[in-house]
Image: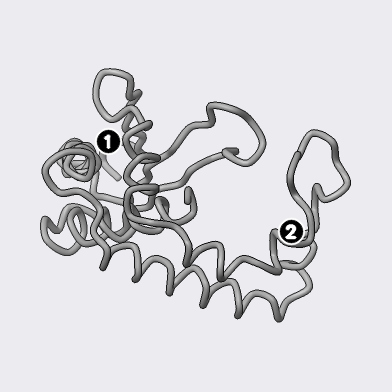
């Protein structure tokens, strides 16, 4: 469910902040450590010109807030995200690196519930998720007062 949420929000951010508002070269949504720790966090990154950074940050916040309120996740959003995740998974199964990543933690007590079905049942599991499941996960994310933000810039003032 969280991978689907991440994919949906990546698409939303890209289409809103980059394509529609033209404020950034790239926009990404990352859920971090959600499979390892209870609570986790998310990170939105953009690559923008320094003079557009604040507008890009505001557009990202608006996009996340909209997905929680007046522009909820749709069935089409979910189907597109599911197709992308399953395609990516099936392609990556051809690499050793992906297999190692999939199998990491299989024998650890601190990663409960991870067994070979994690990769064997990936497609059917992704397809079994409903829009309400993804929306419920999104509703758990802080997108207003609980959100921490910052803008970082590389180079000097004249760069």
CA gap, disc 2 to disc 1? 41 Å
State the mark number for residue 101: 2
Question: Between residues 150 and 103, which one lies in front from this camera angle?
Answer: 103
Q: Write the residue at 23% across / 59% down.
A: 74
State the mark number for residue 157: 1
Q: Position of residue 157 (x, y in %)?
A: 27, 36
Question: Between residues 91 and 76, which one lies in front from this camera angle?
Answer: 76
Q: Position of residue 125 (x, y in %)?
A: 56, 62
**Quadrant holding the C terminus:** top left
**Residue 42 sits in quarter:** top left
Question: Between residues 2 and 43, which one lies in front from this camera angle?
Answer: 2
Q: Are marks 2 and 1 in contact (CB under 8 Å)?
A: no
Question: Between residues 62 and 149, which one lies in front from this camera angle?
Answer: 62
**140 to the left or right of 103:** left
Q: Is residue 136 above or below residue 143?
A: below
Of the two numbered discs 2 and 1 in the rendering, the one whose residue sits closer to the viewer: 2
**Residue 140 sits in quarter:** top left
Estimate how packed mark 2 is, as few (under 14), some (14 to 19) or many (20 or more) residues with alpha carbons within 10 Å: few
Secondary structure at badge 1 equals loop
Q: Write the residue at 48% across / 32% down.
A: 41
């Amino acid at each position: 469910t969280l991978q689907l949420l991440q994919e949906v929000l990546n698409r939303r951010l890209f289409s809103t902040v980059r394509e529609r508002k033209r404020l950034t070269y790239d926009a990404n949504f990352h859920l971090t450590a959600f499979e390892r720790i209870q609570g986790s966090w998310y990170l939105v990154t953009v690559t923008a010109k320094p003079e557009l950074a604040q507008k890009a940050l505001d557009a990202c916040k608006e996009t996340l807030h909209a997905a929680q309120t007046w522009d909820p996740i749709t069935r089409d959003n979910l189907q597109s995200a599911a197709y992308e995740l399953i395609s990516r998974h099936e392609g990556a199964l051809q690499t050793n690196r992906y297999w190692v990543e999939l199998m990491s933690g299989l024998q650890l007590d601190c990663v409960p519930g991870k067994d070979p079905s994690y990769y064997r049942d990936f497609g059917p599991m992704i397809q079994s998720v409903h829009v309400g499941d993804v929306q419920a996960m999104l509703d758990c994310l802080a997108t207003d007062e609980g959100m921490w933000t910052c803008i970082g810039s590389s180079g000097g003032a004249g760069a």
